[in-house]
Amino acid sequence: MRGHWLHPASSQYFRNKDDIFAAVLEALGEQVSSALNEAIQASGSEVLRQMKAAVKALVQFLAENPEKARILIVESSGLGRRLEAVRRRVIASHTRSVEQALRALSGRLPPLEPATVASCWVGAVLEAVYHWLEQPSEQRLLSEDLAESIARFNLRGIGAPIESVEEGKHDRKRERRNQPASGIST
């Protein structure tokens, strides 16, 4: 949002910049949820496959929308209690979904504390995307490779059976391509 001017008419809908930023965050949360739900539905009924699809969809969404990633991961952090609460609500929504999936897998995975592990799962995705976006575009992995790598890392982290971790692994030569040039700077 930094450096962007708002149309004067927007003041009739929002009292201040915090209201605008909160609305942007909430809309972003809905866009992410839509992308995740679509990926989960397309992946079938197997929970581990759904979890992997959700990670890949989140990474792809953020990679394809670096300015939105910046808003979710960086810009909204530390902007005051109200905006932090909105940001936490958006992230908590995804964390609760992971927690539900982990509970559904109870007995198929080593013992774990679902709420804590779900926070680690989502945090790993966001931190890895943040790191990726900070890289010069010519040094970045392909976003698809990044998504696959994070998904495998998270699945291994919960002790998922190796076949679910390795499914979809590709051996193609990793070619670099120009990714969106807008990285994150703090």
Image: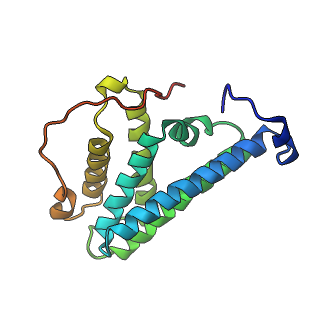
In the image, 135 versus 158, the foreground residue is: 135
Q: Is residue 132 visible in this depiction of the protein?
A: yes
The C terminus sits in image quarter: top right
The residue nearer to you, when weighing 136 against 153, is 136
Q: Nearer the viewer, residue 52 or 57?
A: 57
Q: How many marks?
A: 0
Q: Taking 167 as reference, is 14 left or right?
A: right
Looking at the image, residue 103 lies above or below residue 135 = below
Is residue 39 depicted above or below 154 in this figure?
Answer: below
Q: For residue 72, what is the image quadrant?
A: top right
Measured from the top left, where is residue 67 in percent x and y? 54, 36
* Residue drawn at 29 percent across, 37 percent down: 142
Residue 81 visible in rendering: no
Percent position (x, y) of residue 21?
A: 70, 42
Please report the residue visible at 77 percent of the width from the left and 45 percent of the height from the top. 19
Q: Nearer the viewer, residue 18 or 92?
A: 18
Residue in the picture at 49% in, 29% down:
184
- The spot of residue 40 in percent (x, y) is 39, 66
| Percent position of residue 10, x then y | 81, 42
Q: In the rendered view, would you say 23 is above or below 113?
A: above
In the image, taking residue 44 as reference, residue 115 lies left or right, namely right
Question: Does residue 184 appear to the left or right of 158 in the view shown?
Answer: right
- Residue ID at (51%, 40%): 69
On the rendered image, what quadrant is the N terminus found in?
top right
Residue 147 placement, left or right of 183: left
Coloration mode: rainbow
177 to 107, vertically: above or below: above
